[in-house]
Image (cartoon, grey):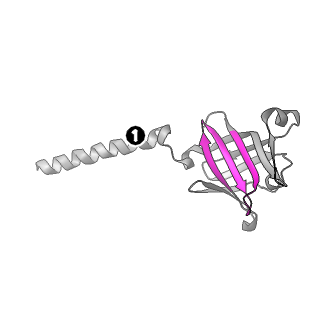
């Protein structure tokens, strides 16, 4: 009888710890951090072995933007006028995560899916896409818009 009570208390204790770990932002999984609205504030592209940087001031001056929303139901919407061919070819659709990659799934043709490596740093989202030769097609930095 005492062993059964001990096991029940131990199970209860572990359940509480697991609940706490899952509820804290520090231990949030990427799939929990990604949903929300994001605004591009800087990006890099590599053209003919030259790394080009467009910072926040240049984006504003040129009236360039890329806003993307990752909904909790795994749909994404985006609004962009960037002159980056990779980004201009993206259409609204479904997103999917595998490890540290997010795939923007084209609604009609899987061959047009775009997969980015992603990371979070100090609350900012980073999206990276390289070509088969390791050149940077797009490396963007996004800040969250509004509450999650």
Mark 1 secondary-structure assignment:
helix
Locate the C terminus by quadrant.
top right
In this view, the residue in front, 13 or 131, is 131
> Does residue 144 lie above or below 74 as drawn?
above
> Does residue 111 lie above or below 139 as drawn?
below
The crowding category of the residue bearing disc 1, from other C-alpha atoms within 10 Å (few below 14, some 14 to 19, many at least 20), is few
> Does residue 63 lie above or below 14 as drawn?
above
Residue under label 1: 20
In this view, the residue in front, 59 or 3, is 59
x then y, percent, for residue 97: 59, 56
x then y, percent, for residue 27: 47, 42
Q: What stretch is highlighted in magenta?
A: 116-142
Q: Does the magenta stretch include residue 136?
A: yes
- Please indicate whether residue 4 sits to the left or right of residue 23 in the image: left
Q: Which residue lies at the image location 50% right of the left edge and 38% below the top edge?
A: 25
Q: Which residue lies at the image location 72% right of the left edge and 57% below the top edge?
A: 130
Magenta-highlighted stretch: main secondary structure? strand
């Amino acid at each position: 009888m005492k062993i059964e009570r001990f096991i029940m208390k131990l199970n209860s204790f572990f359940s509480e710890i697991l609940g706490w770990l899952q509820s804290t932002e520090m231990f949030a999984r990427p799939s929990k951090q990604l949903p929300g609205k994001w605004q591009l504030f800087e990006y890099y592209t590599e053209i003919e072995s030259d790394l080009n940087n467009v910072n926040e001031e240049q984006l504003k001056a040129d009236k360039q933007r890329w806003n993307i929303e990752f909904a909790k139901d795994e749909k994404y919407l985006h609004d962009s006028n960037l002159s980056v061919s990779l980004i201009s070819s993206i259409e609204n659709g479904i997103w999917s995560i595998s490890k540290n990659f997010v795939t923007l799934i084209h609604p009609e043709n899987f061959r047009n899916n775009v997969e980015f490596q992603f990371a979070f740093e100090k609350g900012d989202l980073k999206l990276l896409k390289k070509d088969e030769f390791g050149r940077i097609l797009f490396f963007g930095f996004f800040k969250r818009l509004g509450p999650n």
